[in-house]
Amino acid sequence: MKHLPVVVAFLFLPGSAAPAGEHLPQSTTFKGERKYQTVLAKAKSGNWHTLPMGERIMRFAAELRGTPYVGFTLEIDDHVESASVNFEGLDCWTFFETVLGLARTIEGGHYGASKSDLLREIEFTRYRGGVCGGNYLDRIHYLAEWFFENEARGVAEDITRELGEAQKVVGRKCTEMTTLWKSYRYLRHNPALRPAMAASEAQISRLPVYFIPKEKVARIEDRIQNGDIIGIVTNHQGGFCSHVGLAYRGSDGKTRLMHASTTYKKVVIDSSISQYLNSFSKHAGIMVARPLETSDTVHDATVYRKNLARLTR
C-alpha cells in the first residue's frame, strides 16, 4: 500500500530547547494557565513523576474531571495551524491528548515546565512526524492514524490484537473531514485544502486497522490498564473511530471509560467500557493503545519512517 506522507526531516526532543511549532501567540493557543499551574503544583507535591505512565496519566485526568465539554477546540484560527492547549474546555480528543502531554512533560521530575514545554509535547503527538509547520494538513485528523503515527514514534503501543478477540476493519471510507468541511474553520476558509485532505483520507482509509467487537469486549476488559487510550470504533462510514477516552480502573475493579462526554457535557468517569459500548448502536467496538514511558520515544526520523512503513503495510 502507499504510505502516509512523511512531512519532516527530523524529530525534536520533547523537553529540549528546540522550538515548538508556535505559529500563533500563546494568548490564542494556551487557555487556562491558572489551572495548569495548579495541576503541576499538585503533581510536584505528590511526586507523580515516580508513577508508571498509565497511573500518572490518570492522576492528571482526575484533576480535569468536570471540565466542560467544548466541541471543535482544535479549530483555533481560520488559516494558521498551531499546537494548542485549553484547560477551560475539552473535547474527547483534547482530553486524552492533554493528560498524556502532562504525564510526558513531568517525566524525570521536570516540574518547572513552561507553557511552551506542554505545547511542545502536544505538538509531538498531534502532528505527523511530531512537527507542526503551520499547515492544517500537518495535523493528524483521524484517531486511527494517531495510533499508527504515535506507535511509530514510541509514544504509545497499539495493543488491540494482543488483548485478543480482534478483527480487521474492512471496507471503511474516511470522508468525514471533506464531507463535513463546513464544520471545520480551516477547511471552510481555505477551499484549496480540501482536495489534499481528500487524498489524505483515501490513504487513511487503507490503513490496516484492527478492533475488538463490542460483544467481545467484556471478555478482555480486565486486561486493559489504567491510562490506556480507548478508541471507540464506529459502525458508520466516515472514519474508523467516532470517540475516544481513557481506561479508568476503580476500587470496584471495573474498567470504566473516562472521557469528555457530549451526553454529560463535561469530563466524566462513565460506566464500564463494555456497558458504554452496548448503550449505543453506532458503536462497533474498541481500539486500545497503551502509552509508553518517554524513554521509549523515537527521536530519529529514519527509524520513525521505517517503523511507520512497517506498521502501515
Image (cartoon, helix red, strand yellow):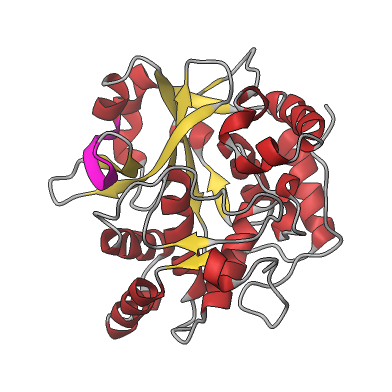
The residue shown at (57%, 16%) is 237
Residue 222 x, y percent position in the rendering: 29, 39
In-image side of 51 versus 21 (left or right): left
Residue 112 x, y percent position in the rendering: 47, 87
Residue 179 lies in quadrant: top right
Q: Nearer the viewer, residue 218 or 196?
A: 196
Q: Is residue 284 magenta?
A: no
In-image side of 284 versus 12 (left or right): left
Q: Is residue 234 above or below residue 307?
A: above
The residue shown at (50%, 34%) is 160
Q: Nearer the viewer, residue 30 or 199?
A: 30
Q: Is residue 199 above or below residue 124?
A: above
Q: Is residue 266 magenta?
A: yes
In-image side of 192 versus 116 (left or right): right
Which region is colored magenta?
Answer: 264-273
Residue 37 x, y percent position in the rendering: 37, 79
Q: Quadrant of the C terminus?
A: top right
Residue 246 x, y percent position in the rendering: 37, 46
The residue shown at (84%, 57%) is 302
Q: Quadrant of the N terminus?
A: top right
Q: Is residue 143 visible?
A: yes
